[in-house]
């Protein structure tokens, strides 16, 4: 019970929101809109999983939104050149991994602070993209949407894909040696090194993993509509970091699980549609989001203080 | 000692850099009163926006025809102070005329007045500043005209009856607020049986507009129409309606570029998109800016002849571009911007 | 600090940065005929004061090993509050400004309380208040309400000159001098670096660590409020989107100025140079007729270059002479 306190408390908050929606706005529970909502949030879940790994490794990446936009546009351009969909997906994941590797090399290789490195790459990718593309939409061939499947099938495929990523990573972090290495490096890099782990390699790999997952997420976003907005992914870094933190992953590394991240993302993803259903004016949205993040960390802080005294 | 010699070197470099001779004046067909090439500085509301890219294309055409220098720059951030900084930079740079699309009417007017006091001509296009901060406004459509046009189009599609919702860019954007005000005024005045049930922002992102539209569709089962007053929201809302299987039941209209909406208009998801000819707006703006510098366009004129585009009417200090177009299934293929 | 030898002085981050700033200046002066004029220098000053103030306030925060993401949002909220107090409550601008400053300190106090009393990571607390402050600004104005038509006596602060310099530059100089003395010349402020370097060690040395940390966040809130007032005076309007994204510019300037994001190392004059480097780059590229995207890209590149410049010589030396002892492992993140 105690070990999963944080995950359970986030899940409880989520249940509370969902239950109050059931009473106040039962219209929230309709099959098609919920399926759409889940599909829209599937890419964010994939990125949040990768972000959790990086944060558990005691690093952070605020460039994911820009990476997402770069991969989205490149994938869109390749698809417009009539590349087959599997090849586009492969290129998207590869490009994402490459962008992640740049961050990883600077952080792990040169031992630079990740928050500053990714601040620099965030600005650089975003502005370079704007410079090159000037904000023009990319029109995609019709065959790419939902990968040629019927809409509902395509939506389920994307949701399933996101869940597979979640489950694989959640189990991998707990069961595989490589996963335990991430926790080890995140809690104490020096101790991990003395235990025979190479911290630099683990750190580098976690950035590459996040990049590849961001690439995959961008691809999952591209196949959802027949045209691509080069501004997509704006604010993705804040959304995923907030989900990871609300989900109970310690920003100081070495602690947390992906189940909590899952609950955290669902909670944040529900806010905007919930406000629409509850007929709350939209100018409250940001304040409510901030209050939820603060409440989550304050609850944790109060609890751990009680534990100490 | 070494420390000071280094500093001295730095200072020496600095001074050497300062003592540069000014650029020799270039000559060209677009020579202004001083005999040098006229520089027109065109300020969009933001960069990376397809609407202003289209304006820029027209402006470049005009610049080539007139043989003038065109500067095109604008904020890449959503910070309202950035437009002022760019204008003030241009004042120091010594451009001849500034043509601005204003994000914040009061805020930018401060900088534009300063430009006028330094002898730089100022006109506005797309969105006006305060009247004393510019000579002319190239008016593509008044906020009132846009608001009424959208509301009338919505009423026509719904037979003046039913619920509708608005998706806009951000709550803070000045022009969006202006349009919203006129839409609501028209609604209250003429269409008592229609009801505005929600207004949601999409942060100028297509993806977010799609999510918002999806939520609106399920939260308001009686919704009959989505009105989108920023350009990324029109395709975003259309995709949401299409995915919800409500194409035809829920109408989609808005302000947007034909190129981004062609697919949905042809499929019958989006009913009509309203916009003026953005390229002509850019062209006319540059023509008017240059004419103002050369003195061929003066306050009080009743018409203005803009090169290849022909004559435009001037009403007060507004140069009128003409009526906005309504793009629909029948005519959208004739436009490629 | 003892007088540095010649070589140490040249290799100091601040010196390198000074050369970068001078090189930027010379380069843009060669490219743009009007760049070097006094008018343009004043433009640069005026456009930089708000971000410069935030960067100055951010320096002690980062020196203690913390971070404050909420300053940009707080600027927006304070601008709104100032407008409300002046227009709706009918207070004269001076009184409204005073109240706004008090409010800014209180808002900084909220950050401080959560960070020190509950021992929460600053990154997360200020991520929360980043949304909260901006959200409140939007909620109060419903996004749309704009405050404008301020009296000329108030606009004088942001748009005119006083004793030869833009008025707000004097305020900036006072704050810069104050924070410099606090951090570099007062025992009180010198403990910031001790805290950032080793909080436990500082505690054992008798420093009231939590109290000092609380102080820097209150100071950041206060300075953000001052920046909000200057911003309002410069633009002549206050709206809920004021200062969007300023926190990132401020952090960039501080880090570019040689302050370690993990705390413990850094200087206020380094921050000033970092602010100057970014401001000159942004302004100069307009004079060189380059689009604004290039300014963003170059800022990112400059940041990476500045960071690696301190690391590369060490790595190079390590490669030439493989050390017997292992190098320090991955540094801890900002918490």
Image (tube, coloured by chain):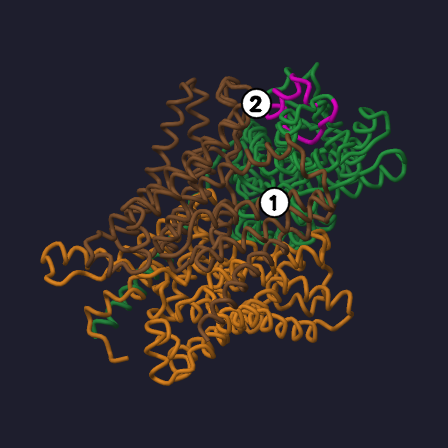
Instruction: Residue A100: name its quadrant.
Output: top left
* Of the pair B226 and C203, the residue shown nearer to us: C203
> What is the secondary structure assignment of the residue under circle 1?
helix
Q: Which chain did the image draw in brown? A: A
Location of mark 1 (residue): A270
For disc 1, the chain is A
Q: Which residue is mark 2?
A: A151
Residue B142: image location, x then y, percent: 76, 37
Discs 1 and 2 carry the same chain letter: yes
When asked about the image quadrant of residue A116, the answer is: bottom left
Q: Relative to residue A49, is residue A100 drawn left or right?
A: left
Residue B255 vs residue B207, the one in the foreground: B207
Number of residues whose C-alpha sits closer than 10 Å to that of mark 1, classed few (under 14), some (14–19) or many (20 or more)? some
The answer to whether residue B135 of the structure is visible from this angle is no
Instruction: Please rate how many residues cluster around mark 2, counting C-alpha atoms within 10 Å: few if below 14, some from 14 to 19, many from 20.
Output: some
Which residue does the image show at 63% across and 51% down from the upper left?
A16
Chain B: give its colour. Answer: green
Side of C154 relative to A296 (left or right): right
Which type of secondary structure does the marked residue at label 2 adopt?
A: helix
Whether residue B260 is in magenta: the answer is: yes
Q: Is residue A87 magenta?
A: no
Q: Position of residue A178 (x, y in %)?
A: 28, 46
Q: At which x and y percent is residue C230?
A: 60, 66
Q: Is residue B304 visible?
A: yes
Query: Of label 1 and label 2, which has the lower sequence position?
Result: 2
Chain shown in orange: C
Q: In which chain is the residue bearing label 2?
A: A
The range drawn in magenta is: B249-270
């Amino acid at each position: 019970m105690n070990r999963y306190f944080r995950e359970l408390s986030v899940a409880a908050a989520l249940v509370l929101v969902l239950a109050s929606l059931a009473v106040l706005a039962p219209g929230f529970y309709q099959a098609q809109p919920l399926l759409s909502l889940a599909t829209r949030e599937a890419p964010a879940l994939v990125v949040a999983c990768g972000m959790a790994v990086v944060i558990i490794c005691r690093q952070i990446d605020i460039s994911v939104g820009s990476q997402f936009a770069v991969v989205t546009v490149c994938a869109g351009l390749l698809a417009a050149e009539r590349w087959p969909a599997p090849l586009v997906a492969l290129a998207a994941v590869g490009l994402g991994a490459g962008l992640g590797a740049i961050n990883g090399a600077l952080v792990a290789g040169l031992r630079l602070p990740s928050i500053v490195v990714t601040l620099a790459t965030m600005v650089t990718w975003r502005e370079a993209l704007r410079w090159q593309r000037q904000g023009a939409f990319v029109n995609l061939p019709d065959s790419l949407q939902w990968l040629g499947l019927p809409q509902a099938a395509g939506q389920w495929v994307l949701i399933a894909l996101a869940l597979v990523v979640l489950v694989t990573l959640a189990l991998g972090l707990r069961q595989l040696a490589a996963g335990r290495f991430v926790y080890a490096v995140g809690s104490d890099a020096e101790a991990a090194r003395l235990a025979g782990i190479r911290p630099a390699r683990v750190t580098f790999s976690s950035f590459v993993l996040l990049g590849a997952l961001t690439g995959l997420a961008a691809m999952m976003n591209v196949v959802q509509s027949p045209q691509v907005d080069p501004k997509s992914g704006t604010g993705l870094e804040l959304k995923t970091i907030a989900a990871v933190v609300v989900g109970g992953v310690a920003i100081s590394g070495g602690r947390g699980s992906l189940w909590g991240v899952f609950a955290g993302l669902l909670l944040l993803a529900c806010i905007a549609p919930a406000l629409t259903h509850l007929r709350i004016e939209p100018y409250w949205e940001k304040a409510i989001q901030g209050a939820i993040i603060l409440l989550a960390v304050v609850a944790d802080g109060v609890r751990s203080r009680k534990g100490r005294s | 000692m070494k420390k000071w010699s280094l500093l001295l070197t730095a200072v020496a470099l600095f001074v050497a850099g300062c003592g540069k001779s000014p650029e020799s004046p270039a000559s060209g067909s677009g020579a202004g009163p001083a005999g040098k090439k006229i520089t027109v500085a065109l300020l969009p509301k933001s960069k990376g926006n397809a609407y202003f890219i289209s304006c820029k294309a027209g402006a470049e055409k005009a610049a080539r025809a007139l043989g003038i220098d065109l500067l095109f720059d604008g904020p890449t951030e959503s910070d309202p102070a950035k437009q002022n900084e760019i204008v003030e930079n241009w004042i120091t740079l010594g451009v001849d005329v500034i043509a601005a699309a204003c994000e914040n009417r009061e805020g930018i007017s401060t900088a534009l007045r300063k430009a006028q006091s330094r002898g730089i001509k100022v006109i506005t296009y797309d969105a006006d500043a305060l009247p004393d901060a510019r000579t002319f406004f190239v008016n593509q459509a008044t906020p009132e005209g846009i608001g009424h046009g959208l509301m009338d189009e919505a009423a026509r599609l719904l037979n003046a009856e039913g619920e509708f919702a608005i998706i806009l860019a951000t709550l803070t954007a000045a022009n969006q607020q202006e349009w919203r005000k006129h839409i609501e005024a028209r609604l209250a005045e003429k269409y008592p049986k229609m009801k505005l049930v929600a207004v949601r922002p999409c942060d100028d992102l297509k993806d977010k507009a799609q999510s918002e539209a999806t939520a609106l569709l399920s939260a308001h089962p009686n919704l009959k129409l989505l009105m989108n007053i920023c350009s990324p929201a029109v395709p975003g809302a259309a995709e949401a309606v299409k995915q919800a299987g409500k194409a035809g039941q829920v109408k989609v209209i808005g302000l947007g570029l034909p190129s981004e909406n062609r697919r949905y208009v042809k499929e019958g998801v989006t009913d009509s998109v309203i916009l003026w000819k953005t390229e002509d707006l850019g062209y006319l703006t540059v023509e008017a800016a240059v004419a103002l510098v050369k003195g061929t366009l003066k306050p009080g004129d009743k018409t203005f002849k803009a090169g290849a585009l022909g004559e435009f009417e001037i009403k007060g200090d507004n140069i009128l571009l003409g009526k906005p177009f309504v793009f629909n299934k029948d005519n959208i293929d004739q436009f490629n911007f | 600090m003892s007088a540095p030898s010649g070589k140490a002085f040249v290799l100091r981050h601040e010196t390198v940065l000074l050369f970068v700033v001078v090189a930027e200046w010379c380069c843009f002066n060669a490219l743009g005929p009007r760049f070097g004029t006094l008018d343009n220098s004043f433009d640069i000053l005026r456009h930089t004061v708000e971000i410069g103030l935030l960067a100055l306030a951010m320096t002690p925060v980062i020196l203690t090993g913390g971070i404050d993401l909420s300053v940009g949002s707080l600027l927006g909220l304070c601008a709104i509050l100032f407008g409300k107090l002046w227009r709706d409550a009918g207070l004269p601008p001076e009184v409204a400004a005073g109240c706004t400053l008090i409010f800014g300190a209180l808002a900084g106090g909220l950050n401080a309380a959560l960070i020190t009393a509950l021992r929460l990571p600053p990154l997360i607390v200020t991520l929360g208040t980043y949304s909260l402050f901006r959200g409140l600004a939007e909620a109060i104005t419903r996004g749309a309400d704009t405050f404008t038509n301020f009296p000329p006596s108030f606009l004088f602060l942001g748009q005119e000159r006083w004793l030869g310099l833009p008025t707000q530059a004097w305020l900036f100089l006072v704050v810069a001098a104050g924070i410099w003395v606090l951090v570099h010349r007062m025992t009180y402020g010198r403990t910031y670096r001790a805290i950032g370097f080793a909080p436990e060690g500082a505690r054992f040395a008798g420093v009231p660590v939590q109290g000092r940390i609380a102080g820097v966040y209150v100071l950041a809130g206060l300075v953000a409020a001052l920046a909000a007032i200057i911003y309002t005076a410069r633009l002549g309007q206050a709206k809920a989107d004021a200062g969007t994204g300023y926190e990132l510019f401020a952090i960039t300037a501080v880090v570019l100025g040689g302050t370690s994001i993990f705390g413990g190392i850094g200087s206020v004059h380094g921050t000033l140079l970092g602010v100057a480097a970014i401001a000159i780059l942004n302004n100069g590229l307009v004079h060189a007729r380059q689009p604004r995207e290039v300014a963003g890209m170059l800022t990112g590149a400059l940041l990476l270059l500045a960071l690696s410049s301190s690391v590369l010589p060490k790595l190079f030396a390590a490669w030439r002479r493989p050390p017997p002892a292992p190098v320090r492992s991955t540094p801890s993140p900002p918490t």
